[in-house]
Image: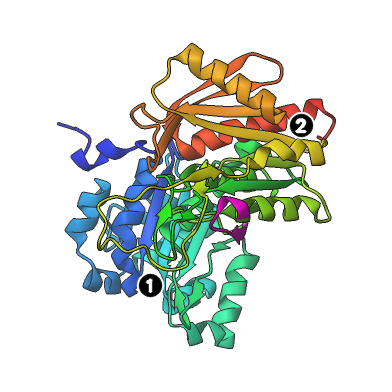
Amino acid sequence: MNQPHPSQDITGALGRDLADRRIVLALCGSVAVARAPELARLLMRHGATVFPVLSAEATRLIGVPLLHWATGNRPVTELTGEIEHVAHAGNVPDHADLLLIAPATANTIGKIAAGIDDGPVTTYATTAIGEGLPVIVVPAMHEPMYRHPIVGRNLDTLREIGVTVIMPRIEEGKAKIASNEEILASVVRLLAGGRQEARLAGRRVLITAGRTVEYLDPIRVITNNSTGKMGMALAAAAAEAGAEVTVVYGRGTAAAPPQARIVGVDTAEQMDAAVRGELAATPGYDVVIAAAAVGDWRPLRQETKKISTHGRDRLVLELEPTPKIIDGIKREHPGVFLVAFRAQHDLGRDELLEDARRRAEKADADLIAVNDVSREGAGFGSDTNEMYLVGRDGPEAHIPLSSKLDVARTIITAIADRLGTRGFA
C-alpha cells in the first residue's frame, strides 16, 4: 500500500502558506541540529512536504529514525544509485521548490562557496544552485568564527550567487541560530510572499499588540490572556507586503518578525503615550492597526508595597477606566487609516457585527476586525483565528478559521485595497 506516513497528518494544520511546496531540509554537524525535527514539523504544519538530507557529521548528533518520524520521508544520508540529488534538486520535472540548509556549518558553507561536493548536503547544494533552485542557508557556528575573514567572504560569495543567508542573533555574547519562526518567515517570503505584491511598499504601519497590565502593587497586576500572536502575525504580513512596521508591544509570548521595530510598554497609559508619540513623529504613519488587548480597568490607587494577605480575608478594589487609545487617533490624525480590533464572548453573528459597527463608529475607524473568543480555535493563545471585517462601506467579510498569519494577510489585503481607493497606491 502507498499510504501517507502517519506523521504527515499534521500537514497544513496551521495554514496553507506552503501548500504543495516540496522542501529539502539539509542538516549539518552542529548541535543546532537538535531543533531540526521541530523546524521540519513547523514547515509541514504550514503545508510543506519536507525531505531530510543529513551530512555524515549530522548523523552523529541526531537519529535518522527521528527525522524519518518527523517528516514521514526517509532521510538521505548517502548518495546511491537512486541519484537522490538529481531526483530532488536536478533538472527533473518534479524537483523540490527549495533547498533549506539549517543548520549550516562553516565547513559546509566553505565547500558550497568553493563548489565542492563531497557528501549529500554539498552535492545537493551544487545541484540546486546549478539548476537555479532557491537556496536558504542558516549558519550555526561559534560567534568568533563569523569574524574570520574567509568565512565572511564565503557567506558573501553565497549571497552574490543568489543564496539567501539568515544570520544568527547575538545574545549573551553568543551567536544563536535564527529561530524556527524566523526561518519559516523567510521560507514563506521566498516561496509564497509574492501574493501581497508589496502593495504597502513605502507605507508606514503602526501596530499595537499583546496585552497591557495594571499594577495593584509592585508585584500583582490585572491583565488578560492575550499572547500577542495576532498582532505579530499582522506585523509579519504588513512587512511581507513591503511596509515599514513599528509595533507598540505590551506583554506577550509571540516573537516579533525581524523586520519590525518594537516599542515595549506595560500599562494602557504607557501604550497610549507610545502611540501618541509615534503618531506625532515625522515622517507620519499611513496605517494604525489597534490589535492590542488593552485592559479596560485599572486600580484607582496603586499600592507602593506588596499588599499583605495576613490579617484579612478579603480585598476590595476600586477601579477606574483606562484610556481608550483608539478613540483619539482620528481626531488628532484624520488622514491615517485606522483599523480597530474587537474581541467579544459568546455572541450571535448579528449581535457580534452590530457591536462591531457601533465600536467602529465611536472610534471613527475605517475598518474593524471582530472575533468571538468563545469559539474553538479563535480564542487567546491559539494559532488560528476566525474573524469578521466590517468597513465604512457597510458589508462585512467573513474570514474563516485559518492560521493567524493567513488571517493577517487577508486583513492586510483589505487595507491595501481600501488605501488604493483613497489614492494612496
Mark 1, Cα crowd under 10 Å, few <14 / some 14-19 / many 20+, is: few
For the residue pair 348 and 115, the one nearer the viewer reads as: 348
Looking at the image, the residue that sits furthest to the left is 1
Q: Position of residue 413 (x, y in %)?
A: 64, 32
Residue that appears at 83% across and 53% down = 283
Say if mark 2 contacts mark 1, CB within 8 Å. no
Between 194 and 247, the residue placed more toward the observer is 247
177 left or right, relative to 167: left
Identify the mark at residue 118; answer none if there is no mark.
1
Figure disc tally: 2
Select label 2 or label 1 by which is in front: 2
Please report the residue visible at 25 percent of the width from the left and 51 percent of the height from the top.
Answer: 70
**In the image, residue 112 lies in the stretch drawn in magenta:** no
Q: Nearer the viewer, residue 274 or 215?
A: 215
Magenta residues, start to end: 261-269
How far is the residue under mark 2 from the one under mark 1?
Answer: 53 Å
The residue at the point 55 percent across, 54 percent down is 267
Name the image quarter holding residue 123. Answer: bottom left
Give x and y (percent) for residue 246: 66, 53
Q: Is residue 394 above or below residue 98?
A: above
Sequence-wise first label, 2 or 1: 1
Q: Quadrant of the N terminus?
A: top left
Which amino acid lies under the numbered mark 1 shown in the image of this protein? Asp
Q: Give residue 419's mark.
A: 2
- Residue type pointed to by label 2: Leu
Provide residue 171's location: percent of width, then percent of height.
48, 76
Secondary element type, mark 1:
loop
